[in-house]
Image (cartoon, helix red, strand yellow):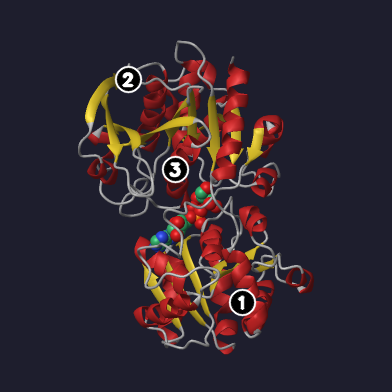
Amino acid sequence: MTEPLRVLQVSAELFPLLKTGGLADVAGALPAALAAAGCEVRALLPGFPAIMAGVQQAEAVGQFTLPWGETVQVLAATLPASAARPGLRLYVLHAPGLYDRPGNPYEDAQRQPYADNHRRFAALGWGAAHLARGLDAAWQPQLVHGHDWHAGLAHACLRFSPGPRVPSVFTVHNLAYQGVFDAMRFADVGLPQEAWQVDGVEFYGQLSFMKAGLVYADRITTVSPTYAHEIQTPEQGFGLDGLLRARRDVLSGILNGVDETVWNPASDGLIVRHYDAAHRTGKARCKAALQEEAGLAVRRDAPLFAVVSRLTEQKGLNLVLDGIDTIVRGGGQLLVLGSGDHEIERAFAHAAQSRPGCVALRLGYDEAFAHRIFSGSDFTLVPSRFEPCGLTQMYGLLYGSVPLVRAVGGLADTVVDADLATLADHTATGIVFADFTDAAFRHAVRRALALYAQPRAWAQVQQTGMQQNLSWTQAAQRYRAVYDAALVAAA
Ligand code: ADP
Ligand code: GLC
């Protein structure tokens, strides 16, 4: 038997320790999925309070000094195995001066990015490079896999630190967040002057962590095939489309999977009743319990539309706000769980106040409630402006909460619009609309209401979605192939 490939995964979040979005779900699920593809993955994380709290049995394996003189201890710990998943070895950067702050890992209480974020995530990059160079004598990775801009600098640190070449793969989860800093921060992060160039980390006179990943990684991936194309266009390239086009031969789109040890209505410990595609009566109980819990009228016949989302511009929620009338006039209900932009929060709060029993809002972040929402709702709304992959539409599919999505990024790759042809050949799994306009969204809602009103077609679409194979198996094999290509490129 061949030895597994040792991979160091680098990310700012990892479920179940710390999660603000889909990145954490992916970082939490990939290591186990990759084990089946012949990889031994360990994860490197910043020592944010939630992460430190989750690794109390950690031991120190070494330390290193940052370019500005601060010392970081590298701890190793094991995330305990559960019935469903094996234990995961973690490295955590213990640097309280950088990470020991309450609340959101990236922003202060006023929702402003921390002024020293370049240092906080340069430390993550250097941590990865030191581990790749043998900081832990007991385990040295053969490849580094960084996720999003937080890990972007790792690829530059690796390239510019002395020692044999260690290949790396960089995954873009969202090109909209780039980690761009004032040029004067460049001196701080400890890269040689030659990195400050157009073919390096310089981005229109500023320092870009995202660019460090895109330039210095041997292979680039993003989280859906459609998004891999979209980011090569000026409309969705956020200024990096030229670079992405230049590197298109090493760029691939690998669709995320769903961690079925966490998201499966037949075994989910957080929902009221279990059910599956063949036995869906439990879902009706979940719906009644959800309506009651959310303060909505408990009505079995009222189609319940749900949003579980960060409330940001990306997610296209102004379309939902405009569409509330159409939902309510059609006899439907709307439930929103989310937090984010104050303006969007206020608009939904106003809608909920003016339509009690029909529209409900829960502000904040609540993992267990999210599970109950997918289990109890009839439709999951994801009308995003752009969506690299999107996980909630996939959770919706598996939980029989039929996704209503805009045809963009990973949403376009995962949901098949219900029309006469796709209903006839049993491939329909949701409602898909194209234009980012109120009219197009309202029309999609009307189509959803019409589908719901036809019990046989409705049951068919719901059931087809629940039967989709969204497991990580295929994606893990694709990542393995990308790793192998990176190893060859760096040899
Ligand atoms: P993004 O990463 O852009 O936020 P995704 O759809 O990939 O979008 O992933 C979002 C993840 O965060 C999903 O697991 C979703 O259930 C979860 N989520 C988003 N908002 C909330 C919330 N307010 N409470 C609980 N879970 C949430
Ligand atoms: C990002 C994207 C989202 C994707 C997630 C996980 O946060 O916004 O579309 O599903 O990363 O890859």
The C terminus lies in quadrant = top right
- Indicate the quadrant where residue 407 lies: bottom right
Q: Is residue 339 visible?
A: no
User: Neighbour class for label 2 at 10 Å: few (<14), some, many (≥20)?
Assistant: some
- Indicate the quadrant where residue 9 lies: top left
Q: At label 3, which amino acid type do we have?
A: Ala
CB under 8 Å between discs 3 and 1: no
Which residue was labeled with disc 3?
A: 27
Task: Look at the numbered disc 3 and give the secondary structure of its residue.
Answer: helix
Q: Is residue 187 above or below residue 213?
A: above
Which residue was labeled with disc 1?
A: 459
User: Neighbour class for label 1 at 10 Å: few (<14), some, many (≥20)?
Assistant: some
* Ligand 1 visible in quadrant: bottom left
Q: Is residue 383 above or below residue 31?
A: below
Mark 2 and mark 3: Cα distance apart in space? 22 Å
Q: Is residue 263 above or below residue 177?
A: below
N-term-proximal mark, 3 vs 1: 3
Q: Is mark 1 within 8 Å of ligand 1?
A: no
Q: At label 1, which amino acid type do we have?
A: Ala
The mark closer to the camera, 3 or 1, is 1
Which residue was labeled with disc 2?
A: 136
The single residue placed furthest to the right in the displayed view is 421
Closest to the observer: 194 or 321? 321
Q: At label 2, which amino acid type do we have?
A: Asp
Q: Which mark is residue 491?
A: none
For image coordinates 23% across by 44% down, the residue present is: 53
The mark closer to the camera, 1 or 2, is 1
Task: Look at the numbered disc 1 and give the secondary structure of its residue.
Answer: helix
For image coordinates 41% across by 62% down, the residue present is: 267
